[in-house]
Amino acid sequence: MIFSVVVPFFNEETYIERCLCALREQDFDKNEWEIIFVDNGSTDASPRIVRKFPEVLLLREERGNEYTARNKALGIARGEIIAFTDADCEVSKDWLSRIYDGMMASGAKIALGSREFPEGKSLPLRMFEDYENAKAEYLFTRSLKEYLYGFCNNMAIEAELFRELGLFTEYLGDTEFVHRYLSSRPDPRVIFIKAMKITHLEVTNIMSWLEKYRHYGQYEKRLKKNEGTYKPLDHKLRMKIASFCIKKNDYNLLQTSLFFLVMFLGVFFYNTGKIKGHEACNKGYG
C-alpha cells in the first residue's frame, strides 16, 4: 500500500464531513491508500459523522494532543508514505497524486504543500495566503535548512522515517520532526510541492487567521525551549521573503502598502503568542 492518510480531530463537526468527502474523492488508485481518523476525545457529533464513511478506520486517543493522536494512527498505518491533513481542511482532488509524483521525482522523504483559504476571501486574507505559500516556496526551494518547518495540515512523510527516528514529540510535533530528520542525514530532501493543495475551511476572516498566528507563536516558544536546530526567521530574511511575495504576486504600490500593514498585524499576533508560549492549550489544536 502506498499511502496512509492520517487525520486527528477534536470537536470538528462543522467541517469534518467536507474533509472526509474530499479524501474519498481522490483520483489516486483506491487500492493503494487507506484513511485513518483519530478522535482525540471529541464531545460533539464528529465521531458519528466519521462512522458514516465505512471505508474510514476510526481510532480514539483521549490522551495528549493532535500529535499523540497522530502517533496512535502511526502504530497501525500500512502505507509507505503517511499523508497528513486536518479535519477542518479540504484537500484537492489530486492531492495524493501530486504528493506521489513530487516525492517520486525528487527522491524527497518529506513533502509539504500549498495552503489556501476559502473562496470569497478578503484581500488582506488573500495576502496572508500569498505570503505563507511564498515563504514555504522561498525557504524550501533554497534548502535553508535551519529555517525549515513542518505543518501537518498538509504534509507527507515516508513511513520508514518514523521507524528510524521515532514518532512525533508531543507539543513539539512536525517542525521538530523535520529537524530531527535534517540532522540525521548528510543530504536530506524536504520539498515544497506547490500543486499539493489544501483549503483551510475554518479560516473565514482575517481574525480567525490572526488567532492561528498567535497559536504558531506559542508553538515557536516551545520549539526554542527545546534547543533544537530550528531557527526562527530574522528581520532580514523576512524582508527577502516579503519582496519575493510582492514580486511573485505582482502587487501594485497600493497593494504593497496594504501587504506590509497585514504583515505587521501578523507579526504582532505572532509575538503575543510567543510571550504567552508557556500557556499550551489542552489539546494543542489551533
Image (cartoon, helix red, strand yellow):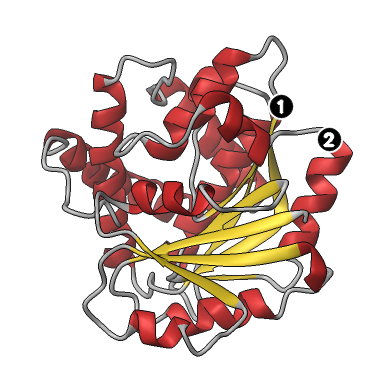
Is residue 238 visible to the viewer in this orientation of the structure?
no
Q: In the displayed structure, would residue 259 be above or below residue 118?
A: above
Q: Is residue 272 above or below residue 224?
A: below
Q: Position of residue 55 (x, y in %)?
A: 62, 79
* 109 displayed left or right of 174: right
Q: For mark 2, give the secondary structure.
A: helix
Callout 2, which amino acid?
Ser
Q: Tell me which numbered mark, 2 or 1, is placed earlier along the sequence.
A: 2
Nearer to me, 254 or 129: 129
Q: Are marks 2 and 1 in contact (CB under 8 Å)?
A: yes
- Residue lying farthest top? 186
Instruction: Check the image and report above or below for 19 versus 274.
Output: below
Q: Amino acid at mark 1?
A: Arg
Image quarter in which the C terminus is found: bottom left
* Nearer to us in this view, 19 or 271: 19
Q: Position of residue 134 (x, y in %)?
A: 59, 44
* Disc on res. 189: 1
User: For the point 58% across and 40% down, which residue is it?
Assistant: 136
**Secondary element type, mark 1:** loop
Image point (31%, 48%), residue name: 266
